Amino acid sequence: MKIGIDGRASNWYRGTGIGNYTYELLYNLNKIDYINDYLIFMPDNSDLEFNPNFLINKIKKNNTNNFWEQVNIPTTLNDNLDLYHIPQNGVGMPKEKKCPYLITLHDVIPFKMPETVSSKYLKIFNNTIPSIIEKCDGIITVSNHSKNDIANTLGFDKNKIYVTYLANENIYKPLNPSYCNFVAEKQYGIIGNYILYVGGFSPRKNILGLINAYYNLITKYNIDIKLVIAGRKGKSYGMYKERCEKLSLLDKVIFTGFIENQYLPCIYNKAKLFVYPSFYEGFGLPPLEAMACNTPVIASNTTSIPEVLGDSAYLINPYDLDELTNAMYKMLLDPKLREKYIKKGLNKVNSFNFEKTAKETLEIYKKVLKP
């Protein structure tokens, strides 16, 4: 087979779910497949070192900081490919179809919860996804929950939707506590114990609910612990900061902004507890990253999260703030409960790996070509 892959996200969106997925897919296909030929569309400044059966079609970045505007510029296929795979929801698919097309559609959140995504992304999604789906010969997604959502929302044949799970990268592991304390304090001014959230700032992530539950925790139980909220400060940041100000929490809630991959494992390691109270996820990778760092996890019992985490996390109803507050209290104060979820978390993480994802993806390529 000669397989083309749009690899732009691996470089331009590294550090996010889609960017890390694309990077790890390329890294592991390169690791396991010496037989098939690959043409990868991406910038030439990637740190990936490819085998001879992987060729790079160099893509130049335009003068914009918006990733979705970048990848919305279609790639041009001048080579004879047996299959072309677009990992970033199909956005950037060539206008002219010269071979079978496969996309990875991570979720359909813009259709399910349009009020929770940016206007730019919503516009791109609404304008492009219908035509993308028409050209698709198959769809990869990241959970059975997303598979059902895609089939029901877009009317795509469920038999042509394939599930491959994500995994945490190898950088997430237990680290030296002294080093993690040093990184947290020097890079982000974080001193002392804290509860951690890592992820996007969309309203569907329920950060406002987390702040309110945290306020209830420290006022009701008089617990001295900070809340660290890590991620790019999207348009909802002002709302979260205003809520912290109203509750007199500005000295207790730390918004770090985006944390680079080299520092993020330390921030996970140092946290007493990781909380992921999202209303909706296609997969939800940060809880697995936290588990890999020996940090116990509280997460929502909604959408794909129970499918991914099973009983390895303390699952709560994200719409019930009292339940979230009490879960944080129990996890912080009960050593046996903490140890139980730390052990369960490590076992769960070991069941996911990107090499397995790459092998399954390679089998999907074959199925799409030989239905």
Image (cartoon, grey):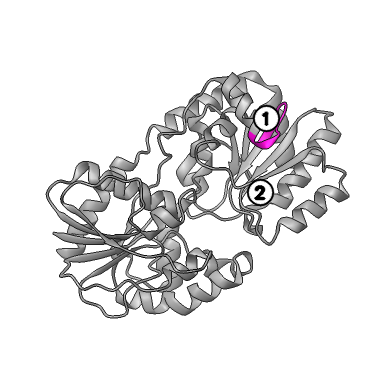
Q: Are marks 2 and 1 in contact (CB under 8 Å)?
A: no
Disc 2: which residue:
318
Quadrant in which the C terminus appears: bottom left
Q: Is residue 279 left or right of residue 225?
A: left
Tell me residue 124's x, y (percent).
50, 74
Q: Residue at x 46, y 55 (%)?
A: 13
Q: Please identify, in this view, whether the residue under mark 2 or under mark 1 is nearer the observer.
A: 1
Vertical comparison of 340 with 275: above or below: above
Q: Is residue 256 magenta?
A: no
The kind of residue on which mark 2 rests is Pro
Vertical comparison of 14 with 126: above or below: above
The circle on residue 115 is none
| In front of the other: 177 or 109 | 177
| In front of the other: 53 or 115 | 53
Whole-number angstrom distance, CA of label 2 to CA of label 1: 30 Å
The kind of residue on which mark 1 rests is Glu
Quadrant in which the N terminus appears: bottom left
Quarter of the image for residue 71 reads bottom left
**Residue 334 appears in the rendering:** yes
| In front of the other: 153 or 133 | 133
Quarter of the image for residue 217 reads top right
**Residue 371 appears in the rendering:** no
Q: Is residue 74 left or right of residue 343?
A: left
Q: Residue at x 64, y 35 (%)?
A: 187
- Neighbours of disc 1 within 10 Å: few (<14), some (14-19), many (20+): few
- Neighbours of disc 2 within 10 Å: few (<14), some (14-19), many (20+): many
Disc 1: which residue:
185
Q: Residue at x 43, y 74 (%)?
A: 129
Vertical comparison of 207 with 262: above or below: below
Q: Is residue 159 left or right of residue 110?
A: left
Magenta-colored span? 187-195
